Every structure is written in C-alpha cells, then in structure tokens.
Amino acid sequence: MHALLAVNWEWELRGTLIVIISVAVLCGSVYLILGTNLGARLGFLVALAGLAGWMFLMGAIWWSYGKGLLGPDASWKPVANETVIRDSGKLYEVGVIDEPFTPSGDASADAAAVQQQLIDSGWEKLNPALPAFQQAGSNGSVFLEESGALAAGEFVVVNVFEQGGDRHPTFWGDRIDFLAFWHDPHYALVEVAPLVPQRVEPGRAPARPVIDTTRSHEYVYMVRDPGSKRTPAAIITISSLIIFLILCWLLHRRDRYVRANRAAKALPAKA
C-alpha cells in the first residue's frame, strides 16, 4: 500500500515506471514473438533493427518539421560588456557605427544623427508592426532593467535596428534550405528614450507617457543566439541510421554464412 501511494503521489516516479512498462510491453512483446520463431539471437537482431529503423524515420520527421524532442530556441543574448550604451558617443568604440560621433547636447538632433549613421553603416530599421521589432524590443527592455540603468516605466522603445544574420550556402533564396548550416552573426540595436517622470495620484488614471527631449537616447546592443532547436532530432536521426545500417550488415553477414554452410558438401558420417 505504501509503495502504491508513493507511485500515485510522486509524479516523476510514476512517469518513469510508465515509460519502463511501455517499452517492456511493446518492444518485449515483439521480441518474444520473433524470438520464438527465429531464435533468441536472430530475433533480437531483427527486433533491434526494426526499432532503429523506426527511430530513424521518427527522427527525420522531427528534424524536418521541428517537432518532438527539441533543443533551446533562438533568443537574444547581451553582448559582453557592451550591452547597455548610455552615451551615443561610444557607439563607434564598440563597433556599432563606422564613423566617430560626438554628441552636440541636443537630444533630438543627436538621435536623428545617430539614426542616419546607423543606416549608413548597414543597419536596417525595423517596422514597429513586425514581430521581430516587438521581440527585440522586449528583450532589450529586460536587459536595460536588469542593468539598473532605467527602471520599468521610465523609458519607451522608439526604434530597433538589425544587422547580419545571413545564412549560407543557400540555393533556393528565402525558402527553407537544409544545406544552410552556417550563419553570420545577427545583431540588434534597441533605441530607447527616457520618459518625463509622472506624478501618480490616487483615484486618477495614469498620465500618458511623454518622452523627455532634454535627455539623450540610450541603446541596447544584443546578438542573436541561433539555438539548437533541431539538434536532438538530428542526433537521433544520424545515430539511429548508423545503428540500423550496422544491424543490417550483421544480418546480411549471417545470411552469407548460412548460405555458404548450406552450399558446402556434407561430411560423411562416422560409423
């Protein structure tokens, strides 16, 4: 009774037992049938070859459609020691823009000048309606808040720029290309503007945020981590294929031995 209660209460133990029983029943029943008809060793080779072939097909489907056992998804990561850039004059030092920039003291004019230099340096300005804008902006906001430069509600994302991220080799343009194993570094630069501090009064709706034009804009520099979403499926597919081919070779070698023994002349029996 105590063991039964433990299985029902501990979900990890229950899940482990379910997997063990399922594998034992499904694979064991097939091996039992093959073993009684082909023998213990030959039945084991045939059953294991069938399991490896099925794992190969399942892994290939997972690998193609990005389903099943998945690795970590792609995400934005902070650039080491260069994530939050509070002074626009340091954009050249970290390699964001190609030409040096000296702030003039006018926040609006400096923001427009930096934006033009970013475009001239190969950065692409994203449309705020794109999902990539929202994703990069939200990640940049998290990094900015974690750094302690600005708190939540003290800034607003105004622009998002991206650069790089091309993959190669490609043979079908923008379509899915299973041969594009290499990717160029993908960077994103989130531009945020500080807000004017608002006084919160009880019983009244919060005031609409207003950008503080006297304070310079700040930037969050990020790099894209492509992740390894299909890596587990690829490992299952390749390893299962190798095991399947080895087992097929063993079965073929056994068939050749059996054929050679049957074709040999029978030895005369001793009296």
Image (cartoon, rainbow, N blue to C red):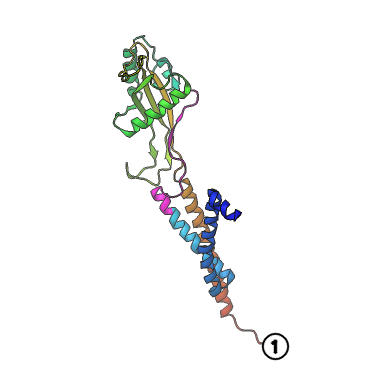
- The picture places residue 252, in percent across and down from the top left corner, at 53, 68
Range of residues picked out in magenta: 60-83
User: Label 1 is placed on what type of residue?
Assistant: Lys
Residue found 34% across the figure and 31% down from its top: 134
The residue carrying mark 1 is: 270
Seen in the picture, residue 79 relative to 32 is either above or below; the reply is above
> Is residue 36 in the magenta section?
no
Indicate left or right for 35 with 143 as reference: right
Count of numbered tags: 1
Residue nearest the viewer, comparing 236 with 202: 202
Extreme-right residue of the structure: 271
Residue nearest the viewer, comparing 24 with 205: 205
Mark 1 lies on a secondary structure that is loop
Extreme-top residue of the structure: 105
Residue nearest the viewer, comparing 149 with 255: 149
Residue found 57% across the figure and 79% down from its top: 262
Seen in the picture, residue 271 relative to 151 is either above or below; the reply is below
Which quadrant would residue 94 be assigned to in this image?
Answer: top left
> Is residue 72 in the magenta section?
yes
The local crowd at label 1, few if under 14, some if 14 to 19, many if 20 or more residues have their Cα within 10 Å, is few
- The picture places residue 232, in percent across and down from the top left corner, at 48, 47
